[in-house]
Image (spheres, rainbow, N blue to C red):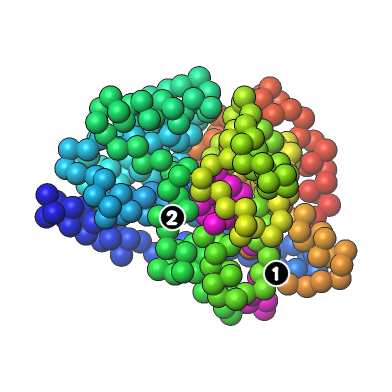
Amino acid sequence: MRHWINTAINKINADYQRSADTHLIKLELPQLPGIDLYLKDESTHPTGSLKHRLARSLFLYALCNGKIKRDTTIIEASSGSTAVSEAYFARMIGVPFIAVMPKQTAKSKIQQIQHYGGQCHFVDSATQMHDTAVQLAEQLKGYFMDQFTYAERATDWRGNNNIAESIFQQMSLEPHAIPHTVVMSAGTGGTSATLGRYIRFKGFSTELVVVDPERSVFYDSYHSGDTALTLPVGSRIEGIGRPKVEASFQPDVIDRMIKVPDAASIATIHWLAQLTGRRAGPSTGTNLWGALEVAKQMLANQQQGSIVTLMCDSGERYLDTYYNPVWVQEQIGDIRAYQQSLALIA
């Protein structure tokens, strides 16, 4: 058994060695003089999203803790991107994988999970995902990966090429090498925890701003201190926002939070596509809207500096939803007011 575990870990580490780092893209925004805005493009990972890093860390964490064996079925509660990445690693080491997800998850994500050999178990609402995953793990004597609990502890926040270390290394030759602000949304809360801890560990003056969509409790919990808050519905922005406060969400490493309207998130990804010719997923819109809000505040305060945020995944996964005008009007609402506001920037 130890030989199998060692082989599985070596396969995952070999995959990492074959992968280059993701790009840091500078946006040209002449209406924001003295402020440099960057997008860390995580869509170029083998499985197409930021969650590739998380899935790798979760598998290594589980393997090194003796939770995964040769015949262990992996179960995850995920609205898509984490499940895609975990299906990839499950196939790599030869174990079965089941993703528990809402029925309304983008079809392209479901197809990608199945492409990597994973199965999809559907529930009616995001609020049912966790309990269903626990039940499946018990029935199948499998292992519930539980990204919402283990995301913040599975990643080495001190370094080891985590997302934070990568950002600061890539910024080293830029005019404002130490970012004024890093902006990140929260799904599990694992990435924001890594960013906040790394910033403090290195003694940087960078502010961590976490953005939160509608139908998510993180923002209200952060301001009230109430970790028992819940909502009866899930987020309309796939991959971020939660109906309850997850264990991986670490409010003490966050400097500030911004609530972002869902219509603003969607307007922003369409604006980004016009600006760069590249489509991004909806959580990128939440991130970028928050980064632009920070930029406006800096401009009003006559401050200069850099802001870094993340492009979490590609918009190609969402052509039938967030890039479909009929779907957007029915599910999100009118985004024109936010589009008009963004048109003043570029």
Q: How many marks?
A: 2
Amino acid type at circle 1 is His
Q: Quadrant of residue 233?
A: top right
Residue 128 in percent (x, y) is at: 49, 25
Distance in Å between CA atoms under marks 2 and 1:
26 Å
Residue 306 in percent (x, y) is at: 69, 69
Q: Would residue 236 be seen by someone viewing this image from the given angle?
A: no
Question: Which disc number belongs to residue 153?
Answer: 2
Residue lying at the far top of the rendered structure: 124
Residue 241 among magenta residues: no
Q: Residue at x 51, y 45 (%)?
A: 247
Amino acid type at circle 2 is Arg
Other residues around mark 2 within 10 Å, as few (<14) / some (14–19) / many (≥20): some
SS of the residue at dot 2? helix
Q: Residue at x 13, y 54 (%)?
A: 2
Quadrant of image for the C terminus: bottom right
Residue 188 among magenta residues: yes
What residue is disc 1 on?
180
Other residues around mark 1 within 10 Å, as few (<14) / some (14–19) / many (≥20): many
* 250 vs 99, nearest the viewer: 250
Residue 22 in percent (x, y) is at: 47, 61
Left or right: residue 150 versus residue 333 is left
Q: Would residue 162 be seen by someone viewing this image from the given angle?
A: yes
The span shown in magenta is 174-193
Q: Residue at x 47, y 43 (%)?
A: 148
